[in-house]
Image (cartoon, grey):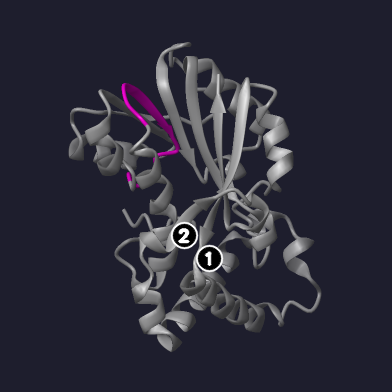
Amino acid sequence: MNMYKTTEIASSEIASDNPIHQRLLFPYLHVSQLVSGDVLEIGCGTGRGVGVLAPQVSNYTGVDKNTELMQELSQKYPSFTFIDMFLPPLKDLPSNHYDFVVTFQVIEHIENDDFFLQEAARVLKPGGKLYLTTVNKKFSLTRNPWHVREYDALSLQKLMEKHFSTVITEGIHGNDKVMAYYEENKKSVQKITRFDILNLQYRLPRTWLQVPYDIANRMSRLIVSKANNQLVDSIQVDDYSLNQTPDTSFDFFYTGIK
């Protein structure tokens, strides 16, 4: 099965995806130094972070809404648990059970984000921690029709505070090299969206736009990669860092303590 038919899943195997892949890999490497015990990953996707987290934990459970993918990951990592699940709720997962819950770039895809956070808190042990990332809508170059919504730093923090006793909000920042790629991608996207003279990307139902968005997004990444191959190839996970100014960061990084 081709898991990369949508640009929502950045591939380590597609050269033009490299800057996005490194950006998505960064939070896994960061939390790998923080997690232990029983860990649940909500929205484990292609398993980008399983190999990173596995050496640090006693038990790993990954959930996602893709039967074939969960079967493939179960075969690849037979000592861990993978569950095909449309969520929320986290059906049949026990309350007060996990030491850590990890969910990266997932909540923006969830219709009922409040229930999603409620369920994440439910399955955590008292004192357990949720690590969550999502995009900063200020850095979105166009409407992403795969996202139900996008957030600013404060709005999601307030929502999380309904379910967690402590919420810490940080940002994932890119260095000058990453910002140079962002600006090149921005120019490429603007060349494509200039044809949307009726501003249909913000007027049509998002499900109508998903396929055109993927085509345009893939085209934009390829254009940037062809014109700036050295830049695209050179970006590594170390070019991203955690900072205390989330509003000026590509992604938000939240820690919620139950």
Any part of residue 191 in sight: yes
Q: Determine the residue positioned at 60% across, 57% down.
A: 249
Which residue is disc 1 drawn over?
214
The single residue placed furthest to the bottom in the displayed view is 227
Where is residue 60? Give x, y as percent. Answer: 30, 28
The residue stretch that appears in magenta: 35-47
Earlier-in-chain disc, 1 versus 2 = 2
Left/right placement of residue 7 relative to residue 116 reads left
Q: Determine the residue positioned at 58% across, 40% down.
A: 107
| Of the pair 211 and 4, the residue shown nearer to us | 4
Q: Which quadrant is the C terminus positioned in?
A: top right
Find residue 6 and name its label.
2
| Of the pair 157 and 10, the residue shown nearer to us | 157
The single residue placed furthest to the front in the displayed view is 244
Q: Report the predominant secondary structure element of the magenta stretch.
A: loop
Q: What element carries label 2?
A: loop
Instruction: Verify CB contact (< 8 Å) between mark 1 and mark 2.
Output: yes
Mark 1 is on which residue type?
Answer: Asp
Where is residue 150? Give x, y as percent. Answer: 67, 49
Image height check: is 180 above or below 72? Answer: below
Crowding near the residue tagged with mark 1, few <14, some 14–19, many ≥20 C-alpha atoms within 10 Å: some
Left/right placement of residue 49 relative to residue 169 reads left
Left/right placement of residue 112 relative to residue 184 reads right
Find residue 182 and name its label.
none
Q: Determine the residue positioned at 43% across, 85% down.
A: 228
